[in-house]
Image: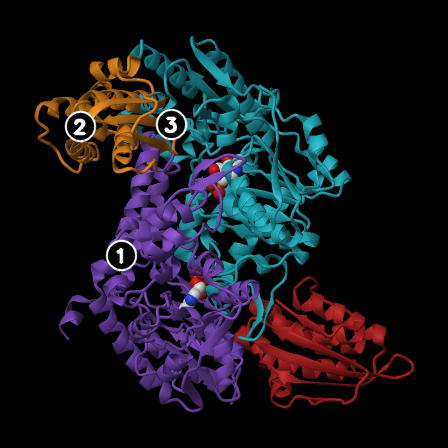
Chain colours: A purple, B orange, C cyan, D red
């Protein structure tokens, strides 16, 4: 492939200082990027530079450092706007992460638009962060949470989606990519179907952003959320994209500094645009770090990343399928580079502990997707999730360590 | 270091800020606009009278502001007085572009020079809002809204 | 003084790399720590090390990096528990900042305990972050926000407090130190008076933590909140201390991963302790950085810090008072090292812009305390706020720059 | 690298995990406790019969768990069977201290050795909860609560 020539994974690995670490004396095989990704040096430098050269609080200061800090912070917002192709920076709200972003929408949009009997439509693929906020708001408003089922391969049943979408549905909230089993959900189709019935859609892009280019206007998403730490940025930062026309109608979520127009004890009026939803001192340096992370992946290019990851995914799938008594869970036609599996008679926690000794980092557990685990009738799985810095050696190390587990429990 | 400052606080600006022209209220008046800057708590009210030809026959302002916003209001009222409503709105647009750095130069005829004086503010991004606040208030008065707040 | 011998401000300044920067070619005179403090190298190193040596998501992993990351994150919680003298780490909740912490309490505790006619008692010294969340919750519950007035020196009127405290009062929320004018509020007395009537108290410690040792058990505070970036830690992190007995009764605030016990679409049960209130991936590295910041200030010692800052405060107060046409706003007997002032006929914004050219960074504006500005009938003030790294040169530079302003506007 | 692992997954543990003793339900039973680990979704139920001397006359368990929690439950039921209720609670306390590393050694008489076997888990902090889960379930059964969840 043409792109592959310009994509050198060994060079990319050098951008990530963590790969110099030894784990129990072994090479680090990091297959847990689905939980959180490692950080390239450019991100770490952006963070440190922001603190050492231009640090001050943003927005309210006329002095030099405050001005520079504000420029960098707002510059990161513009970077993210451009990356997602949002129309205006007013539509880019910085949050603590995906979880806060969804809670903000559930709370602000939800409280304003949900009545008893209304329905919130989710799917069986959702992360707890895209379930629990809706349950909390449903409880408060008398609305009901419904979930679109999946088939055994882990694909959303689109005919079920169509029939569950009704005049009672007030919002659809689905993941773009399943964190537990990798399914890529046809969100464009979902948005079109929902819009045909006048229903707004929130897309949880936490697992999509590291793997693909997302264009919120091409998707026509009403809300699109993601979390910084999974996309090679710092912890403590996330993004809510929301259409301006919705933001204008939505009441504030949290109250505090920076989101007000005028405060008196009798009456307070609120700012407009993203400011209305960014109460208090924002995660300034984390936003700047996230901007650097987005620049970094754009520098590599998503065609390159996707080609590399899909090649790894198919190699890993072939290798793991060939093992005795190992079952891959989730075999959707469109998948991101995530392989979830279980082993006959051996518990994921034991697998995780044993292969960790070989330096292999995978996630074992329910991946914050218990309804999906219930669907497959397993308490937990082993999940290997890949990112742009993984290579074939990582797959080989994983496979070797699984064989060791089998040996151990023979 | 004083060069940029001297550019911002030119004599004419200091003069307008210390001795603002057209300061006061017109009551009753046909148009009124209120500007509020939540960053500093400053407020500017602009009062306007249009005659039967949609010409600004009188314009005044009052409120609390810094030297920049006061001078800007003072110079603005001088410039706008006697202008047609449409021309006033065009001047607003031109000045906004100049102050935010969107344009380097504008052609506003005889008013160009006075507007350029205020444009020194673009070297001070945090102060741009101070300069544009009265203009926004004037604009909202003309288009019939009553309150704006810049941010 | 004995402590002063062991406290060398010039040595401390070397711990903060920002002081190597030149501002418009001048020495940096940073008097804006009240808005946000600068970061010592140990904090920056803790942040970078966490990303380069031990980074992974916390809590849910059995692999080495996840375990190390969890140990560091939970270690920071223990550092903060010990520093505040909380009884248990379960009482230490990491938030995005003070603003989120207060919103959490207003929302979770407020919704659970406020009825129409109930009162929330604040003070005129509050930051918007300790006003607006209460207004939002008052609006939703039908409760009323009341504010205890102050005298002209900026001191809370304690007799007014006593008489305003009634059986309608369901919570008292006051600042420990005023961010705008520096008043140190007698919070112990307030807590005792409130407790005598069975009313719980939230203390906003944002401006206290950088300057004094706070012991939540000695105070008997029910809630105590602060923000990391003002106490030399990273942005994007804050702390809510809350008594366990209150946390147990309080419903969750945000929903998501990590705060649940078991999730199904029918019914979700929640975790206990701090976990119930920490939905989603927390600001992991920011918490670790905050732990390092707390260790740093404890290494210097609060007696040393307080003695140094109080000496600076009295020097600055004397110097500024001696200037013509300059008025200090807020002259409480107990003050932290914050000097707010105004100049006759010269607007704070113009002052800020002019002295910035001399490298002097102060905050001008309403300091997110508009009700206090209304009390003093000024739209804004100039605020110089000091921290442990400031010295007499900073005061001298400030005074020289004020003289320059006077020259300019003569 | 295998040393720590061999310490954790000793033959006796693997044996108990593959062939758990006292697996099953007692219905009806006088005491029952349920343990749930939200991290992995594992569940353990412990069923107990006390005789008139407050002696554990019978104890069984069922549920889903990893090798560590299953072996721990299996070995625990072996140890607890026939013990006085008070002694069972003391053993619980001792084992908890051992597994969390609070104590290096304990004296539990003839049971010491069997408890020490399970204590290898303290090298694996994320697995301590697996080992203690059945013990917590047993303890809640005895003190009369019905569900605990470790975290
Ligand atoms: C007294 C006080 N309370 C609350 C806050 C809000 O803190 P943050 O903006 O970090 O949430 C601040 C600082 O901005 C403050 O000084
Ligand atoms: C699909 C999905 N949604 C939401 C989240 C929650 O993100 P965060 O924990 O950063 O808030 C995650 C990751 O944890 C995820 O994978």
Mark 3 or mark 2, earlier in chain: 3
Pointer 3: residues within 10 angstroms few (<14), some, or many (20+)? many
- For this view, does A370 lie left or right of residue C15? right
Pointer 1: residues within 10 angstroms few (<14), some, or many (20+)? many
Q: What residue did someone put label 2 on?
A: B55
Residue labelled 2 has its Cβ within 8 Å of some atom of ligand 1 = no
Is the residue at mark 3 from the same chain as the one at mark 2? yes
Eye-nearest disc, 1 or 3 = 3
Is the residue at mark 1 from the same chain as the one at mark 3? no
Residue at 61 percent of width and 64 percent of height: C271
Looking at the rendered structure, the secondary structure element under dot 2 is loop
- For this view, does C267 lie left or right of residue C16? right
* Chain name for mark 3: B
Q: What residue did someone put label 3 on?
A: B42
Can you say which quadrant of the picture contains the N terminus of chain A? bottom left
Whole-Å distance between the Cαs marked 2 and 1?
41 Å
Q: What residue did someone put label 1 on?
A: A86
Residue B66 percent location from the top left of the image: 33, 22
* Chain name for mark 1: A
- For this view, does A47 lie left or right of residue C179? left
Looking at the rendered structure, the secondary structure element under dot 1 is loop
* Chain name for mark 2: B
Is the residue at mark 2 from the same chain as the one at mark 1? no
Residue B9 percent location from the top left of the image: 24, 19
């Amino acid at each position: 492939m043409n792109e592959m020539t310009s994509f050198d994974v060994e060079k990319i690995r050098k951008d990530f200082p963590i790969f110099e670490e030894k784990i129990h004396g072994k090479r680090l095989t990091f297959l847990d990027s689905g939980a959180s990704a490692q950080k390239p040096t450019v991100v770490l430098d952006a963070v440190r530079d922001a603190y050492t050269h231009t640090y001050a609080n943003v927005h309210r200061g006329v002095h030099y450092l405050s001005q520079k800090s504000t420029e960098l912070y707002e510059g990161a917002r513009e970077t993210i706007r451009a990356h997602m192709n949002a129309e205006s920076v007013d539509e880019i709200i910085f949050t603590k992460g995906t979880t806060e972003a969804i809670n903000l929408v559930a709370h602000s949009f939800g409280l304003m638009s949900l009545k008893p009997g209304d329905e919130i439509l989710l799917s069986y693929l959702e992360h707890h962060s895209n379930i629990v906020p809706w349950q909390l708001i449903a409880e408060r408003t008398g609305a009901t949470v419904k979930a679109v089922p999946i088939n055994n391969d882990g694909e959303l049943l689109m005919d079920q989606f169509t029939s569950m979408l009704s005049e009672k549905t007030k919002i659809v909230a689905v993941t773009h990519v399943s964190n537990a089993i990798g399914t890529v959900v046809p969100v464009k189709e979902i948005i079109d179907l929902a819009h045909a019935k006048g229903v707004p859609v929130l897309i949880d892009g936490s697992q999509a952003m590291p793997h693909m280019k997302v264009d919120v206007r091409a998707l026509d998403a009403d809300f699109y959320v993601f979390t910084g730490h999974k996309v090679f940025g710092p912890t403590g930062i996330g993004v809510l994209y929301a259409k301006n026309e919705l933001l204008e109608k939505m009441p504030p979520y949290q109250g505090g500094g920076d989101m007000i127009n005028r405060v008196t004890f009798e009456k307070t009026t609120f700012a407009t645009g993203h400011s209305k939803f960014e109460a208090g001192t924002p995660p300034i340096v984390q936003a700047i770090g996230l901007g650097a992370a987005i620049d970094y992946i754009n520098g590599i290019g998503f065609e390159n990343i996707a080609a590399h990851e899909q090649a790894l995914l198919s190699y890993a799938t072939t290798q793991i399928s060939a093992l005795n008594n190992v079952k891959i869970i989730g075999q959707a036609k469109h998948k991101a580079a995530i392989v979830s599996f279980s082993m006959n008679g051996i518990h994921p926690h034991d697998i995780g502990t044993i292969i960790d000794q070989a330096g292999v980092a995978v996630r074992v557990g329910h991946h914050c997707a218990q309804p999906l685990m219930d669907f497959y009738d397993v308490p937990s799985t082993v999940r290997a999730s890949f990112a742009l810095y993984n290579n074939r050696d990582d797959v080989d190390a994983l496979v070797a360590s699984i064989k060791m587990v089998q040996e151990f429990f023979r | 270091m004083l060069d940029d400052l001297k550019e911002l606080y030119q004599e004419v600006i200091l003069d307008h800020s210390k001795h603002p022209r057209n300061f006061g209220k017109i009551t009753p008046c046909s148009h009124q606009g209120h500007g509020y800057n939540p960053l500093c708590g400053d407020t500017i009210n602009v009062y306007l009278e249009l005659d039967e030809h949609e010409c600004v026959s009188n314009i005044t302002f009052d409120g609390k502001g810094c030297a920049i916003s006061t001078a800007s209001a003072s110079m603005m009222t001088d410039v706008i007085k006697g202008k047609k409503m449409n021309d006033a709105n065009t001047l607003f647009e031109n000045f906004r572009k100049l102050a935010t750095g969107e344009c380097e130069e504008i052609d506003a005829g005889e008013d160009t020079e006075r507007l350029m004086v205020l444009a020194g503010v673009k070297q001070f991004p945090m102060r741009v809002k101070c300069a544009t606040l009265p203009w926004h208030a004037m604009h909202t008065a003309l288009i019939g809204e009553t309150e704006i707040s810049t941010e």
